[in-house]
Amino acid sequence: RPTVPFDPSLVTLVGPAIAAAGGRLPKIIVFDLDNTLWTPELYTLRHLPGYADAGPPNPVAGRDVWLLDGACHALHELGTCECWRGTGVAVASRTNKGGWARALLAQFRH
C-alpha cells in the first residue's frame, strides 16, 4: 500500500530528458497488471465475493488493490507530458480475473 498519497509535483519526468538527448521514445508501452501496476495479485483475493467468476461485487481500487508508487509516476507522466502524446499505452495480463481487471482499470482511471 502506498504510505502517502500520490503527489505529481514529486515526479521527475523522464521523457523530456530522453527527447532532449536525441533519444527516441517508444511507439507503445505495455504494462503487466499484477505486481507491475498494482498489488496484490488478483488471485490472492479469494476472500472477496465474486471471486469464482470474477463477477460483481468487484474489488475496489484503493481499498482492495493499490497502484504501486512507480506505476503512479509512470502513468502520470504518460498521461500528462506532451512528449508522450504519440505513444500508446496498453496492459497485458495472464489473469483469469479479466472482469475484475477491467473494472479496476476503470476505477483507477478516475
Image (cartoon, rainbow, N blue to C red):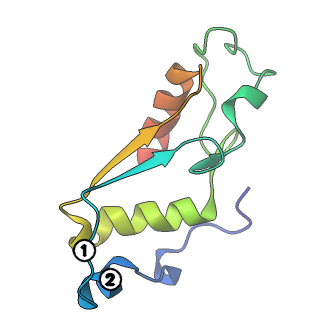
Residue 110 visible, this angle: no
Determine whether 32 is above or below 49 in the image. below
Residue ID for mark 1: 24
Residue sitting at the far front: 23
Task: Classify mark 2: residues with Cα within 10 Å, few (<14), some (14-19) or many (20+).
Answer: few
x and y percent of residue 96 in the render? 59, 19
Q: Mark 2 — residue? A: 18
Residue lying furthest right: 47
Q: Nearer the viewer, residue 55 or 93?
A: 93
Answer few, some or many: residues within 10 Å of disc 1's Cα (few below 14, many 20 plus, some between 14 and 19): few
Counting residues from the start of the chain, the first of labels 2 and 1 encountered is 2
Distance between the alpha carbons at the discs numbered 2 and 1: 7 Å
Quadrant (top left, top right, bottom left, bottom right) of the N terminus = bottom right
**Residue 85 in picture, x, y percent from top left:** 20, 64
Q: Identify which residue, 74 or 64, lies in the foreground.
A: 74
Q: Is residue 66 above or below residue 47?
A: below
Task: Kindly identify the residue that appears in the image at 52 percent across and 33 percent down.
Answer: 93
In the structure shown, which secondary structural element does the residue marked by tag 2 occupy?
Answer: helix
| Amino acid at dot 1 | Arg
At 47% from the left and 75% from the top, the residue drawn is 8
Disc 2 residue type? Ile
Q: Quadrant of residue 50?
A: top right
76 on left or right of 27: right
Does 74 sit left or right of 68 as displayed? left
Task: Give SS at disc 1.
Answer: loop
Residue 82 appears left or right of 30: left
- Residue at 77% x, 30% y is 44
The label on residue 64 is none
